[in-house]
Image (spheres, rainbow, N blue to C red):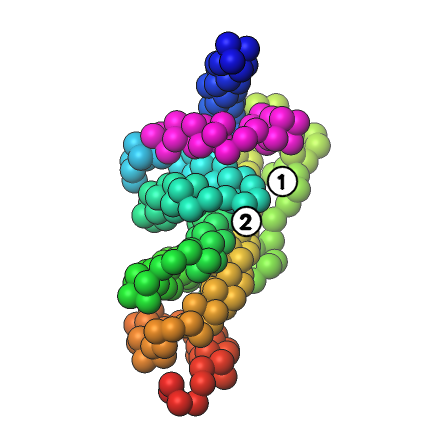
Amino acid sequence: MRSLIIIFMIFSLYCVNAADEVSALDYKEYKVYIIKNKPSFDVLQKTLDKVIIECEKIDKLTNIEERAKYGSWAGNILNNLLSINNLNNEQVDYCWQRATILLNKMDLFPHEINASLLGAMVTLSDRYLSKDISESDFAELRKNNTERFCVEINRIEKEIDSTWYQGKYPTELNVSLPEGVPGIAGMSPSHIKDPIKRKEYETAIEENSRKIQIDNTQGDLRNAKKSVEVRFVFYVPIAYQRKPYNTDELKELLNKYNIDKATQEQILKKVEAAIPKDDK
C-alpha cells in the first residue's frame, strides 16, 4: 500500500512538472512536445488553464502577434484535448467551458484561428449530442453556435475587397533600381549615394511591400472564409435536423446576417429534406 502511495505521488508530481514545462514553451516547441510526449488530459488541462489566463488579458489594444500567439496556442491545446478518445462528461464540460471563453473573444483573434475554434465547437457540440441534454438546452446551444458562425462570416466579408484579384497589384521579388543607378535590384538603399534616388528607391520598396501585404491579406481572408463556410454548411443542417425542429428560426438567422442565397438554399434544402413531413 505504501508503495502505491509513493508511485501515485511521483505520478502527480510528473503531471505538475510536465504542465509547467509545456506552459513555458512557445507554440512551435509545444507542437514538438505534443508529438514526442503525447501528454495526458490532466497535463493538457493544466496547460490550457495557464494559456487561457493570458487569453483573458487580451483586448483590442493587444498587438495582433500576441493575439495570434495565444489564440492559436489555446485553440490547438483544445483540439488536442478533443482528439483524446472516450472523454467523460466532466471532461467534455471542461472543454466546452474553455472553448466558450475563446469563442467569446473571436472578435480579437485572427480569422484563421477562429476557423479552428469553430471547428472545435462543432466537435464539442457533437459530443454534447451524446449526452442527456434537454431539447430546450440543445435549441439554445444550436442557435448560439449558428450565430457564432454567421458573425464570423460577416466579419470576414467586411474585410474582403470584392474588387481584388490575384495579380491586381503587380509586385517584384526584388525591386528594380531607379533609372541610372548602378547595382543589383533588391540591394539595400544605403548603397545609393544620391539622396533623391535613394528616397525614390525606398518609396518603391515600401509600395511593393504594401502591395504584397494586400495580396497576402486578401488571399488569407478568402481562405479563412472557405474554411469557416465548410464547417458552417456541415454543422448547421445537422443541428437543425434534430428536434426541436425550427426552420423558421434558421431562416431568420440566415437572413439577419445576410448569408448569401446559394449557401442559404444549400443549408435549408438539407434541413427540410430530413424533417418528417408531419413535423413540417
Q: Position of residue 56 (x, y in %)?
A: 31, 35
Q: Residue at x 45, y 85 (%)?
A: 276
Mark 1 or mark 2, earlier in chain: 1
Instruction: Give the residue pinned by disc 2.
Output: 216
Question: Marks 1/2: CA distance?
Answer: 18 Å
Looking at the rendered structure, the secondary structure element under dot 1 is loop
Q: Nearer the viewer, residue 148 or 198?
A: 148
Magenta residues, as a range? 29-54
Q: Secondary structure at mark 2?
A: helix
Please give the label number shown on residue 175.
1
Magenta span has 40?
yes
Q: Position of residue 194 (x, y in %)?
A: 55, 27
Q: Nearer the viewer, residue 137 or 227?
A: 137
- Residue 199 in sight here: no
Q: Residue at x 68, y 36 (%)?
A: 185
- The C terminus: image quadrant: bottom left
Figure check: 73 above or below 128: above
- Residue 97: x %, y % from top left: 35, 44
Residue 177 location in percent, x, y?
63, 37
- 255 within the magenta span: no
Closer to us: mark 1 or mark 2?
2
**Which numbered circle lies on residue 64?**
none
Amino acid on which disc 1 is placed: Val
Kindly report the secondary structure that dominates the magenta region of the rendered protein.
helix
Q: Which of the 4 quarters of the picture holds residue 264?
A: bottom left
**Along the line of sight, the residue nearer the viewer: 273 or 197:** 273
Q: Is residue 40 above or below residue 232?
A: above
Tell me the quarter of the picture where residue 245 sits: bottom left
Residue at position x 70%, y 30% from top? 183
